Image (cartoon, helix red, strand yellow):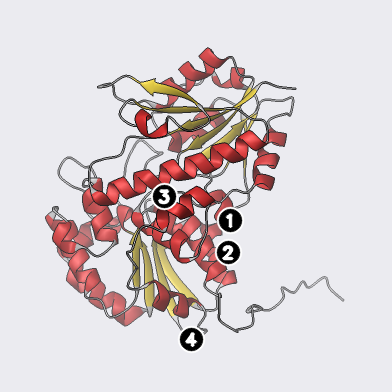
């Protein structure tokens, strides 16, 4: 049997009440994950900056602290820890990922890495959040990517067989921003420690209930926007009653080096009010991944997390970036229900919304006709 470890990377938490809430939720989700892994006999290693280590001392995991003042590089850190541990196989997780995985899911990941060939099983090939790697030695020669998003590309380019998990809420949901937490809280999902943290937060989303009503309404049209994977969109449409429209922009935004500018960034930087007026006229509700759509700050970077998180919650007075503040104000004044967030909102979030929007609604789940084949008699 292989010597298997679980390796969890937990990032630093920026200062601010909203960012600290997301950080606390990630810590709680990590604790739930490590407890589940331990029940399967898989020891865990937690890689985190020194500033985060004091919050994680009570976890049943070995902690590897990165030195203060050093720039984090995912691939080099991964290589170093795997060399030091001499593991044969590894389950990698970014903290906040896998928060909806059950024991049965973890058992399947553990079974995968017992295979004899060099292979990797990723939750998302295009933007990795967690992965099962069957042969640690095979990844030692790859050019290590700076972030985990590009791990699938790096492994595939090195000739390692890459496999992807079925897309559903369990495999795709990842805690990144406050709207992710609001979805988990509203629908009572996640492990016991995570739910305990979320129970202390009193914020309720002003549009979530109205949007869920649209999802179960056959006459409603819901607009999607952002880094949407076509299979995710298809699954969402099949599981909801509403009609959907959308625009998929910015896929691979953090995985590809060219960083091409999505089309709508230019429009929203100058015409945010007009955009939301047109959106109201075009649909009954909208779910938007703003990171791929809103304009970047000077220097080609996203605004600070505090700005992005406040924008997700329509707290425009707390948004310092002028373009993002204007967009947030226009969104807050919209007459239709809106959800704003990051990539998870149009990935794992869509799967979760499609699953739970039916709660308490006595509508038939069979919404679409059976497929027909000309070969049938």
> Residues under labels 4 and 3: Cα distance?
29 Å
**Element class at badge 2:** helix
- In the rendered image, residue 186, in percent from the top left (x then y), is placed at 45, 66
Residue placed most toward the observer, 301 or 313: 313
Reading the chain from its start, which is encountered first: label 1 or label 2? 1
The dot on residue 271 is none
Of the residues tagged 4 and 3, which is closer to the observer?
4
> Residues under labels 1 and 3: Cα distance?
18 Å
- Pointers 1 and 3 in contact (C-beta within 8 Å): no
Circle 3 residue: 251
The answer to whether 2 is drawn above or below residue 91 in the figure is above
- In the rendered image, residue 154, in percent from the top left (x then y), is placed at 49, 29
> Residues under labels 4 and 2: Cα distance?
19 Å
- Pointers 4 and 3 in contact (C-beta within 8 Å): no
- Pointers 1 and 2 in contact (C-beta within 8 Å): yes
Of the residues tagged 1 and 3, which is closer to the observer?
1
Circle 1 residue: 168
- Classify residue 192 as left or right of residue 72: right
Circle 4 residue: 219
> Residues under labels 3 and 2: Cα distance?
18 Å
Residue at 65% x, 41% y is 106
- Is residue 57 visible to us here? yes
Of the residues tagged 3 and 2, which is closer to the observer?
2
- In the rendered image, residue 155, in percent from the top left (x then y), is placed at 54, 29
Quadrant location, the C terminus: bottom right
């Amino acid at each position: 049997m292989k010597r298997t470890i679980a390796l969890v990377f937990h990032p630093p938490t920026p200062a601010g009440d909203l960012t600290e809430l997301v950080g606390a939720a990630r810590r709680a989700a990590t604790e739930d994950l490590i407890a589940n892994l331990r029940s399967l006999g898989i020891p865990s290693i937690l890689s985190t900056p020194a500033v985060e280590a004091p919050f994680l001392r009570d976890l049943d995991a070995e902690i590897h602290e990165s030195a203060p003042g050093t720039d984090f590089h995912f691939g080099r850190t991964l290589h170093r820890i795997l060399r030091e541990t001499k593991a044969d196989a590894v389950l990698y997780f970014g903290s906040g990922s896998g928060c909806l995985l059950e024991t049965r899911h973890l058992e399947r990941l553990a079974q995968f890495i017992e295979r004899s060939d060099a292979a990797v099983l990723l939750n998302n090939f295009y933007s990795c959040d967690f992965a099962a790697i069957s042969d640690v030695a095979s990844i030692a020669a790859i050019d290590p990517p700076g972030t985990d998003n590009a791990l699938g590309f790096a492994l595939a380019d090195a000739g390692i067989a890459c496999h992807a998990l079925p897309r559903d809420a369990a495999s795709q949901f990842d805690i990144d921003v406050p709207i992710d937490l609001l979805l988990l809280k509203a629908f009572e999902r996640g492990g016991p420690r995570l739910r305990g943290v979320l129970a202390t937060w009193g914020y309720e989303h002003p549009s979530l209930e109205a949007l869920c009503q649209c999802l179960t309404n056959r006459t409603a049209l819901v607009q999607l926007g952002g880094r949407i994977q076509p299979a995710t969109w298809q699954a969402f449409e099949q599981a909801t009653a509403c009609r959907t429209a959308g625009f998929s922009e910015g896929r691979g935004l953090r995985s590809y080096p060219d960083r091409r500018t999505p089309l709508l960034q230019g429009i929203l930087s100058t015409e945010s009010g007009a955009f939301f007026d047109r959106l109201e006229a075009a649909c009954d509700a909208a779910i938007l991944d703003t990171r791929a759509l809103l304009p970047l700050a000077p220097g080609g970077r996203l605004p600070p997390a505090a700005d992005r998180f406040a924008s997700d919650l329509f707290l425009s007075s707390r948004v310092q970036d002028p373009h993002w503040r204007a967009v947030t104000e226009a969104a807050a004044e919209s007459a239709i229900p809106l959800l704003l967030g990051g990539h998870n909102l149009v990935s794992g979030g869509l799967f979760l919304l499609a699953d739970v929007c039916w709660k308490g609604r006595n509508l038939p789940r069979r919404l679409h006709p059976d497929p027909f084949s000309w070969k049938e008699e």
